[in-house]
């Protein structure tokens, strides 16, 4: 059993999930639910993690959490929806369900070491404002280390 | 003299250069030394990379912590999202030995190790904790008495409390306090500790629309509060609230006229630094009418 599986098992402990009082503090605190009330509901999402996992892994809803932690902070039962959703996405990614947009940003990170693209002549522009150069990518050694740590299997998971 | 290892992050150093200029000018004026490196990797947004592989994601984030340990300097982050990722990795690894062992197995493949003593600071936490509001108040030789500022906390500066260890999670007040040290009035409004959905805007059209809708709620609320400007702590929030105003003008004809500053901008102004030293001309929205009214232009 990998460490990820162990963590997920602990967070998804049936006994612990049954602590959910259905109070809706998570949904009431969630900025994504406030903005998209008919598309996103963390309380229901949490129920689906334990009751409807195979379908959930294929659904876009799993990828809408904006990772703000308000639900985790406010859950009166100490359930950690944010970390649970991140771990559940690991299961989706193993089955090949990663939406295209997140994949594209991750490819950008693996290619350059940054989540946003740096234009070719950017350092000249920075210099004009008295700022030190940052390069189009991070150092080659750092890029190699990054790819080695992330690993071939994960690199395959973010291919188009 | 205080020395930090600067962790510039992607958004600040590429998309919000004005903020990076401002932050460097203020820390220089405070007598701090900022050391740079060319081999930090992206903080690895948990909502993306840790979603693919929780443990390898943490290892990539912890690689940056390991570099800070090697330098024996506290990391100074410009972005709240970087601060959140690095603090989260530190919290999870320091608490769970199995996870730390697993992460260190990955780091050993590239000759690195996370030992556990790295320190993570954000520009705002460094100002609050290392310099203290009282010292900043004494440095405010040109106080901004005429400015009504709407503080915007964002998320990862203080959420969750157990990772960030900075402010109260329901009623944060440290940014309000810091704003008042510059002589400005910190305006109260409902959405001040709201989320900008910047970190959730990666999903495509659905989440971009969601973040614009939330930006509109926040901007309406700030406008009603009577504030002259927004003072944020995170370059990602700044970008969302700036671009949000531009889009809402194009799409709905709504004019908010709310310059978006970072806290260091108004701190710098109150310390007597010039708008051009603080890169205020490099922002997406024009703050010159407000700066003229404040007699800084």
Image: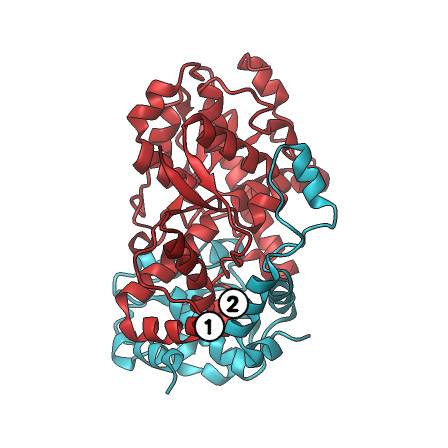
The image shows residue B260 at horizontal and vertical percentages of 55, 33
Tell me the residue at 54%/74% (across/down).
A148
Quadrant location, the C terminus of chain A? bottom right
Residue B287 pos. (x, y %) = 61, 25
At x 33%, y 32%, the residue is B131
Residue A82 place in picture, x, y as percent: 40, 64
Mark 2 falls within which chain?
A: B
Residue hosting label 1: B56
Position of residue B60 measured from the top left corner of the image (x, y, whole percent): 47, 66
In the picture, the disc for residue B186 is none
Q: How crowded is mark 1: few (under 14 residues within 10 Å), some or many (20 or more)?
A: many
Q: Where A66 sits versus A123, above or below?
A: below
Residue for badge 2: B49
First along the sequence among labels 2 and 1? 2
In the rendered image of this protein, does residue B34 appear above or below residue A156? above
Q: Chain letter of disc 1? A: B
Q: Nearer the viewer, mark 2 or mark 1?
A: 1
SS of the residue under disc 1? helix
Report the residue that reaches farthest toward the top. B295
- Chain B appears in which tint? red
Chain letter for cyan, please.
Answer: A
Q: Which of B205 and A100 is in front in this view?
A: A100
Dot 2 crowding, Cα within 10 Å, few <14, some 14–19, many 20+:
many
Q: Which colour scheme is used?
A: by chain
Element carrying mark 2: helix
| Residue B75 visible | yes
Instruction: Answer yes or no: is residue A58 visible.
Output: no
| Residue at the spot 29% in from the left edge and 25% down from the top edge | B134
Does the CB distance between marks 2 and 1 fall below 8 Å? yes
Name the side, left or right, on which A100 lies relative to B116. Answer: right
């Amino acid at each position: 059993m990998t460490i990820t599986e162990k963590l997920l098992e602990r967070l998804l402990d049936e006994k612990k999930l049954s602590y959910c009082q259905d109070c809706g503090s998570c949904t009431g605190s969630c900025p994504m639910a406030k903005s998209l009330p008919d598309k996103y509901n963390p309380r229901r999402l949490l129920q689906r993690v334990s009751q409807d996992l195979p379908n959930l892994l294929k659904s876009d809803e799993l990828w809408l959490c904006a990772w703000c932690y308000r639900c985790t902070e406010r859950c009166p039962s100490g359930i950690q929806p944010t970390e649970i959703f991140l771990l559940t996405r690991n299961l989706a990614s193993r089955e090949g369900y990663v939406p295209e947009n997140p994949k594209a940003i991750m490819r950008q990170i693996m290619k350059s070491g940054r989540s946003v693209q740096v234009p070719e002549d950017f350092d000249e522009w920075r210099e004009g404002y008295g700022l030190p150069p940052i390069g189009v990518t991070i150092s080659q050694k750092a890029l190699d280390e990054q790819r080695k740590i992330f690993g071939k299997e994960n690199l395959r998971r973010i291919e188009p | 003299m205080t020395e930090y290892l600067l962790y510039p992050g992607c958004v600040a150093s590429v998309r919000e250069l004005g903020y990076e200029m401002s932050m460097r000018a203020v820390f220089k004026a405070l007598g701090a030394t900022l050391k740079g490196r060319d081999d930090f990797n992206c903080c690895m947004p948990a909502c993306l990379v840790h979603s693919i592989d929780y443990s390898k994601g943490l290892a990539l984030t912890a690689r940056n912590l390991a570099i800070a340990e090697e330098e024996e300097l506290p990391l100074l982050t410009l972005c709240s999202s970087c601060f959140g990722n690095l603090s989260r990795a530190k919290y999870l690894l320091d608490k769970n030995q199995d996870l730390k062992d697993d992460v260190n197995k990955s780091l050993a493949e590239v000759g690195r190790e996370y030992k556990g003593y790295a320190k993570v600071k954000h520009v705002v936490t460094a100002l609050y904790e290392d310099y203290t509001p009282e010292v900043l108040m004494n440095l405010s030789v040109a106080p901004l008495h005429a400015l009504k500022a709407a503080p915007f906390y964002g998320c990862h500066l203080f959420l969750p409390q157990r990772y960030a260890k900075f402010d109260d999670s329901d009623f944060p007040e440290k940014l309000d306090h810091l704003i008042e040290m510059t002589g400005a009035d910190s305006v109260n409004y409902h959405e001040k500790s709201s989320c900008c959905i910047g970190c959730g805007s990666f999903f495509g059209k659905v989440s971009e629309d969601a973040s614009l809708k939330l930006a509109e709620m926040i901007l309406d609320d700030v406008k009603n509060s009577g504030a002259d400007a927004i003072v944020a702590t995170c370059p990602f929030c700044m970008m969302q609230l700036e671009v949000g105003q531009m889009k809402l003008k194009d799409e709905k004809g709504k004019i908010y006229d709310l310059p978006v500053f970072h806290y260091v901008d108004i701190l710098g102004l109150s310390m007597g630094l010039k708008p051009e030293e603080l890169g205020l001309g490099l922002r997406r929205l024009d703050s010159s009418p407000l700066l003229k009214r404040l007699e800084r232009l």
